[in-house]
Amino acid sequence: MRALKRSLVALALAGVFGAAQAQVSDNVIKIGVLSDMSSLYTDLAGAGSVVAAKMAVEDSGIEKRGYKVEVISADHQNKPDVGSAIARQWYDTDKVDVIVDVPNSGVALAVSGITKDKGKAFLVSGAATSDLTGKACSPNTIHWTYDTWMLANGTGSAIVKTGGDTWFFLTADYAFGLALERDTEAVVLKNGGKVLGKVRHPLNTQDFSSFLLQAQASKAKIIGLANAGGDTTNSIKQAAEFGIVKGGQNLAGLLVFLTDVHALGLPTAQGLIFTETFYWDLNDQTRAFAKRFAERDKGIHPTMVHAGVYSAVTHYLKAVEALKSDDGTKVIAKMKEMPTDDPLFGKGSIRVDGRKIHPAYLVEVKKPSESKGPWDYYKIRSTIPADQAFRPLAEGGCPLVK
Amino acid sequence: MTLFGVPTQALFGQLLIGLINGAFYAMLSLGLAVIFGLLNINNFAHGAQYMMGAFCAYFLLQLAGLGYWWALLLAPLVVGATGILIERTMLARLYKLDHLYGLLLTFGLALIIQGVFTNYYGSAGLPYQIPSELGGAFNLGFMFLPKYRAWVILASLIVCLATWFVIERTKLGSYLRAATENPALVQAFGVNVPRMVTLTYGFGVALAGLAGVLAAPIYTVNPQMGANMIIVVFAVVVIGGMGSILGAVLTGFGLGVIEGLTKVFYPEASNTVIFVIMVIVLILRPAGLFGRER
């Protein structure tokens, strides 16, 4: 009886506010954070992405203006079939309006297809494959934080230009790893380097010593790690053990997150060079965000994926308010039309192929002696301006670009 | 010189790596085989207990300042003690029931333990350095062998041989084996069988904890490390023959080598090859390579 009474009250309240937001479906903007909540990408996305989405909703103040926003979350377990099933259920029966995050390129590509079919909205932060804005681009998807082309371009060209001209790839054997390897190989070849060999390992491998020996035997100057999360930390840790760096070969972590450096510890991670689009210690605004974020996420400082979720949800809510509608296709179009501006990435824009544009940073991991304490890990070596950080619009092969 | 298109030097290196990974499989499947042999329990919490061993080493270092060698001694004791607690309070109630209940209980425990650790420590892992005494490496000519890996093989061989010796060649071992066959009769001779069962489970779990400490400096200490390992280790036990000590050890090392070679010739299949072998073995010899039909 009480439940019935409560839902009647809720219905009545919804009626009151309903007038202000006639176009918002079922009177709630429902944001679904679909992420890896239990496996190797949990810390760099996972629960932190839910925190970031909630912070974006709170900071936008949209609820004070009569809109009701709900943030829900689920674990896709890094399985495209599980992710697809959740996305369908969210869109069809749970009235979810927008899905955000989705680390793991395999799952993200599947969700992007479903989102397009259902006419909803998809804001990618965690996934990396540049195909999301290339041949698999969609009018309902925006790829926010980073992608494989940007990583390859930032890290790859910096390394080839400083003499690292022969490469061996250690690649995670799925959509993301293959895309990262392909994009990096292109950069290496373009800058006059050579690829001596590559080996593909299954996702979530514990022991890399066998692969590292093959890399060692190749005599390549650079071992490119086209993997992520736990796979990257294990490869770096074991490479140190096998004396790879002492033997004169260098590692290029093509996708390394702040949480990976934290897991490795500075003695092992020092000197690594890689590309990021966000670091919490960039300016006063990012530091303030990191402080609030860490308090809510077990002390973990925000990765670029978390920052991307915050920034994407912030811009999404602005577009919904401007349109007074949460129709997926229209909101995405509006988001591309409006310039972006938020405390974490500054001013930016979104291209017609769905690529969010902002600067990228080439960072180097500090020596233990340079670090002032936990999470003080990066030196910014150079900034890649927004117009050079991402793949030129014409080269992606996205059908939306005419 | 090359063999199957791979330089023989590289091949030797890969064989050695395979043996190192086999050492972990052997030590974990040994604990499982001991537990299954005496308790008839499929201890699915073994992976979680392996992970607890690694975490225990991390806590000892962070909270008590005790380094690797202390951890090697203390972590198995602590993890073994939690095992004894689990046996006394939960497993002891299940012996008269079907295997399935033990499997469900331990599997549930594994999920809970992993969930709790993930909740507090996340999944990215925690750093644990190789002890300074074992840093560096031997140059074997055909490969660069980290001292720590050599130590892992040595430690594992010692533990496996000692366990095999105790169970197969001593009086205590003969009680254990007799209790496996007919607990009521052994009890009638004045041997305290329930206590022996408890201690055996504790010992099997302590072996998992020890393997966890050995693994901590190589892999990052993270809550998932056991989950990735346990399925493979169960396959090892099944291939070796459930309950066979020698079978578990030999199959552990053998499969480590086969997996290592797969990583050279067809890396994409490296985490399925063991299951393919398991299927073939189960078709040809349902009791496993070293098992006997009961």
Image (cartoon, rainbow, N blue to C red):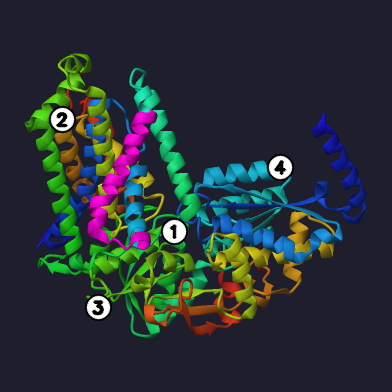
Q: Nearer the viewer, residue B87 or A391?
A: B87
Q: In this rendering, do the residues under marks 1 and 4 share a single chain?
A: no
Residue A189 left/right relative to B137: right
Residue neighbourhood size for the residue with mark 1, other residues' Cα within 10 Å, grouped as few (<14), some (14–19), many (≥20): many
Would residue A144 be visible to someone looking at this image? Answer: no
SS for dot 3: loop
Task: State how far apart marks 3 and 4 are (Cα).
Answer: 55 Å
Q: Give the range drawn in magenta.
A: B62-90
Type of the residue with mark 1 = Ala
Q: Which of B64 and A337 is in front in this view?
A: B64
Using the image, name the chain to which the residue with label 1 belongs: B
Counting from the top left corner in percent of width and height, residue B287 is at: 22, 25
Residue A304 included in the magenta stretch of the image: no
Residue neighbourhood size for the residue with mark 4, other residues' Cα within 10 Å, grouped as few (<14), some (14–19), many (≥20): few
Counting from the top left corner in percent of width and height, residue B137 is at: 17, 68
Type of the residue with mark 4 = Asp
Using the image, name the chain to which the residue with label 2 belongs: B
Counting from the top left corner in percent of width and height, residue B19 is at: 17, 51
Q: What residue did someone put label 1 on? A: B124
Type of the residue with mark 3 = Gly
Residue B41 left/right relative to A66: left
Above or below, B22 relative to A247: above
Q: Could you tell me which residue is drawn at 28 percent across and 67 percent down?
A: A239
Q: What residue did someone put label 2 on? A: B290
